[in-house]
Amino acid sequence: MVQRAAKGHRPAFDQLVERYQNQVYRLAWRFFADPDDAMDATQEIFLKAYRSLPSFEGRSSFKTWLYRIAANTCMTLSESRSRRQKTFIQSVIDWFTTPPAPDPSHLVVEQEARAELQEIVQKKIAALPEVYRVPVILRDIEGMSLDQIGQILNIPEGTVKSRINRGRRLLQDSLESFYLGRKEA
């Protein structure tokens, strides 16, 4: 299918998009923590993949090649959109000023608490420096091996390990600071 798509067979490329679009979108969503930015990034990623497909040499799997394009595109888009992104402070203000859904059910409260925690973690991940954000997302959320991440980012496995460890430490420090600050308030 990849070979047919590389030769310009549009239905074959459409099948590849269908097969990988959810995974690529999920990566972009975790990178940006914003569905609109994630959708824009996903479209840009597949556009770049379509244009670059004739030069795909098959030295890695198509998925690895696509994830490399995705990671690089997310980092590039993040740099160009940095002026427009909300600051963490603004996100926290928005979170505290948004009224909760009116439902007294214990189950709903528990689900909301879980959703709040997921949102906080997602925002903290999105706030990590890019050099650590992508390896943490690929390893801890996407479940990729160190070797796969190294291939996607084109860096040695030892560098992947150190970036993941550093990213995890930064994330942990950030979450602890937020939790302690919130508990004291």
Image (cartoon, grey):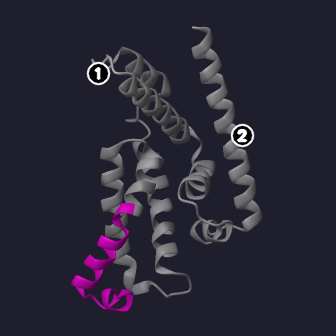
Mark 1: few/some/many CA within 10 Å (<14, 14-19, 20+): few
- Please tell me the numbered disc located at residue 101: 1
Give me the residue at 72% from left, 68% from top. 156
The answer to whether 11 appears left or right of 54 in the picture is left
Q: Please check the rendered image and state whether residue 143 is part of the magenta-colored stretch, yes or no.
A: no
Give me the residue at 48% from left, 67% from top. 67
Badge 1 or badge 2: first in the primary sequence: 1
- In depth, the one of 8 and 112 nearer the eye is 112
Q: Is label 1 or label 2 in front?
A: 1
- Please tell me the numbered disc located at residue 169: 2
Residue occupying the far front of the picture = 106
Q: Please check the rendered image and state whether residue 11 is part of the magenta-colored stretch, yes or no.
A: yes
Give the magenta part as a residue range. 1-22
* Mark 1 in CB contact with mark 2 (< 8 angstroms): no
Q: Amino acid at mark 2?
A: Arg
In the rendered view, tell whether residue 155 sits above or below residue 75.
below
Q: Amino acid at mark 1?
A: Ala
Give me the residue at 27% from left, 88% from top. 8
- Please tell me the numbered disc located at residue 24: none
Q: Position of residue 66 (x, y in %)?
A: 45, 71
Q: Position of residue 49 (x, y in %)?
A: 37, 73
- In depth, the one of 113 and 94 nearer the eye is 113
Provide the major secondary structure of the magenta segment: helix
